[in-house]
């Protein structure tokens, strides 16, 4: 899972079915840290406790509107916001953008478009967070999704990138097999253990001097794997 999919998301809508549907879409696309709220009051309470890094707001809420909610959320912290609402009039869109929203999507919507817009907002908003990581035999450039080894750029596949991202976030600590499968294959990771082992082998071929005797990506027998970073 790449770094944007670890962002904490606040989802606010008074329709339970919509909350469940959007939560499912997000989780099926690798976003796991999601909290929901059905009213302005509840949203403020969740925001204060959960410290979201991105919010998806409906305009029409039982105790107010999303424009007023956005203003209150911005008094707590400044993070990107997407309006997801049935109110598609131009005036509502203008009000949303004038309130400081990063994007405005009208219901009904295609799941693929929702994920595309969320991904674009998060990459734009947090583009400086992809680090360069130094290992014993190489460097990982997460921004370009390459391993730099002996002056050569070795591209990472999407799954390799997601696995290395998950390992780097827990650098020096054990990441379980289940956690890595979930990072790469979503919330239904069961049955991917063999695929994980194959990807680990290919990652080692890219980052290790001797993949058969790894010094950076270690196996912790029966538990998972650990990434040893030279400089965190």
Image (cartoon, helix red, strand yellow):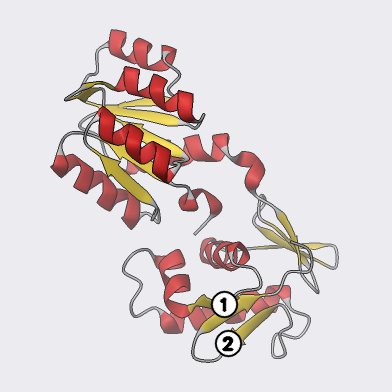
In the rendered image of this protein, does residue 99 appear above or below residue 18? above
Q: Which mark is residue 174?
A: 1
In the rendered image of this protein, does residue 167 appear above or below residue 211? above
At 30% from the left and 22% from the top, the residue drawn is 66
Please indicate whether residue 132 sits to the left or right of residue 220 in the image.
right
Q: Mark 2 near mark 1, Cβ–Cβ under 8 Å?
A: yes
126 or 33, nearer to the observer: 33
Could you tell me if residue 102 is visible in this image? no
At 40% from the left and 56% from the top, the residue drawn is 30
At 34% from the left and 80% from the top, the residue drawn is 191
Quadrant for residue 22, please give it: top left
Relative image position of residue 213 (x, y in whole percent): 72, 90
Quadrant for residue 49, please give it: top left
Q: Which mark is residue 220?
A: 2
In the rendered image of this protein, does residue 62 appear above or below residue 157? above
Relative image position of residue 115 (x, y in whole percent): 37, 43
Please indicate whether residue 91 sits to the left or right of residue 170 in the image.
left
Q: Earlier in the sequence, mark 2 or mark 1?
A: 1
Relative image position of residue 185 (x, y in whole percent): 40, 66
150 or 131, nearer to the observer: 131
Q: Residue furthest right?
A: 150
Mark 1 residue element: loop
Could you tell me if residue 190 is visible in this image? yes
At 35% from the left and 49% from the top, the residue drawn is 34
């Amino acid at each position: 899972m790449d770094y944007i999919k670890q962002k904490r998301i606040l989802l606010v809508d008074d329709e339970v079915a919509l909350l469940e549907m959007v939560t499912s879409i997000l989780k099926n696309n690798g976003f796991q840290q999601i909290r929901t709220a059905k009213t302005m009051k509840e949203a403020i309470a969740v925001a204060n406790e959960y410290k979201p890094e991105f919010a998806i707001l409906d305009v029409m809420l039982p105790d107010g509107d999303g424009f007023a909610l956005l203003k209150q959320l911005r008094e707590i912290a400044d993070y990107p916001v997407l309006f997801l609402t049935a109110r598609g009039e131009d005036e509502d869109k203008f009000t949303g953008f004038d309130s400081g929203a990063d994007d405005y999507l009208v219901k009904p919507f295609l799941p693929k478009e929702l994920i595309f817009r969320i991904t674009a907002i998060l990459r734009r908003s947090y583009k400086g967070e992809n680090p360069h990581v130094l290992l014993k035999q190489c460097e990982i450039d997460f921004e370009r999704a390459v391993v730099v080894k002996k002056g050569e750029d070795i591209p990472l596949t999407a799954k390799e990138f997601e696995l290395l991202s998950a390992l780097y976030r827990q650098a020096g600590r054990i990441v379980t097999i289940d956690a890595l499968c979930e990072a790469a294959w979503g919330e239904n990771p069961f049955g991917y253990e063999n695929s994980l082992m194959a990807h680990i082998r290919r990652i080692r071929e890219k980052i290790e001097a001797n993949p058969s005797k790894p010094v950076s990506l270690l196996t912790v027998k029966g538990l998972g794997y650990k990434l040893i970073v030279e400089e965190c």
